[in-house]
Amino acid sequence: MMRQKKTVLATLAAILIVSTAVFVSLEMSQKEAYGQQVPVIPASRERTVYSTGSAVASISPDLVTVQFGVDTEANTAQDAIRSNSDMMNTVVSAVEKIGITKDELSTAGFSIYPVYEDSVPDKITGIHKSILTGYRTSNTLYVKTTKLSMAGDIVDTAVGAGANRVDNISFSLSPEKEQSIQDDLLSKAILNAKSRAEKAIDPLGQKIIGVKMVTLSDFNSSPPPMYYGAMSAMADKSTPIFTSNQQVTTTVSVIFLIGDQ
């Protein structure tokens, strides 16, 4: 019986020694593993290249604006307004008869102001006084239409019906056409910026790997062609009016992310 107890105690002691050795071994392994861990290295700073691109198009205008008016004078303001109104109504009716609709007509401005003679000295006091001689009424009308070929006819008809002032004739792009061109030019400008960036970084052994930022510029177009003082409309022949293309330009700025090839 005593021999069995000694055997059991010896076995338990052996198990305890082995377990302790294993535990110590595991603890040392964990400490060793933690001690060999490589610290986390922060990501390197982004490498970028800045590039600008542009795109240009020569576009035929699809909108013409003719601005003309009627100026009248009379002794009273009421008479000046009445006279001007009668003349302008005659002009509008004549323009509508050649195919211009009411939607294509709009008032650009209307004004009435007194007209004075040059000041003359009073015979008694010698003080200069301005003498009221009447009133002047000015009424300005816009015709805005896509019927470009009618520009000369509009001028001739308006002047023939009583318009005594033709301010200007201008050609431009309609909002719909302008938006379409803008969308097309933006994509071309961005491709131009990308091409320039690639040419710049290729000798450096770099390539484009992404885009960080894109900045779009305003849509720019050259001022519309204008024709002033079309008094030749008084002549027997029709007034010649010619259109010309407009230069439309857009630019973009792009910051590209780059990396090794």
Image (cartoon, rainbow, N blue to C red):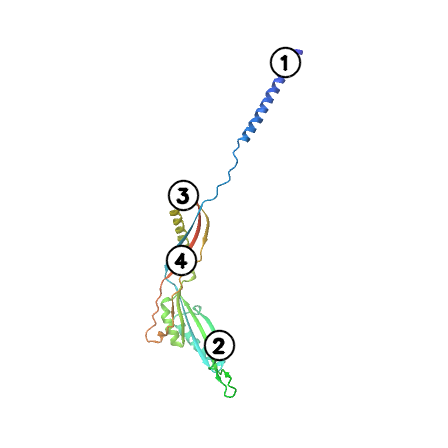
Name which quarter of the figure residue 202 lies in.
Answer: top left
What is the spatial separation of the Cα atoms under label 1 and label 2, in whole angstroms?
Answer: 130 Å
Query: Which quarter of the image is occupied by the C terminus?
Result: top left
**Residue 220 location (% of width, % of height):** 42, 59
Mark 2 surroundings within 10 Å by alpha-carbon count, few (fewer than 14), some (14 through 19), many (20 or more): some
Does residue 1 appear in this view? Answer: no
Q: Amino acid at mark 4?
A: Thr
Q: Nearer the viewer, residue 11 or 30?
A: 30
256 shown above or below 115: above
Name the mark on residue 249.
4
Q: Are marks 3 and 1 in contact (CB under 8 Å)?
A: no
| Residue farthest front in this picture | 126
Q: Are marks 3 and 2 in contact (CB under 8 Å)?
A: no
Q: Amino acid at mark 1?
A: Thr
Q: Amino acid at mark 2?
A: Ile
Residue linked to disc 3: 206
User: Residue, x 39% and y 51% (percent of image)?
Assistant: 192
**Residue 81 location (% of width, % of height):** 48, 78
Which of the two discs, 3 and 2, labels the residue nearer the N terminus?
2
Name which quarter of the figure residue 96 lies in.
Answer: bottom left
Which of the two discs, 3 and 1, labels the residue nearer the N terminus?
1
User: Residue, x 59% and y 24% (percent of image)?
Assistant: 24
Residue linked to disc 2: 112
Disc 4 secondary structure class? strand
Q: Are marks 4 and 2 in contact (CB under 8 Å)?
A: no
Which of the two discs, 4 and 3, labels the residue nearer the N terminus?
3
Query: Which quarter of the image is occupied by the N terminus?
Result: top right
What is the spatial separation of the Cα atoms under label 4 and label 2, in whole angstroms?
Answer: 42 Å
User: Residue, x 67% and y 11% (percent of image)?
Assistant: 2
What is the spatial separation of the Cα atoms under label 4 and label 1, in whole angstroms?
Answer: 100 Å
Say which of marks 4 and 1 sits in front: 4
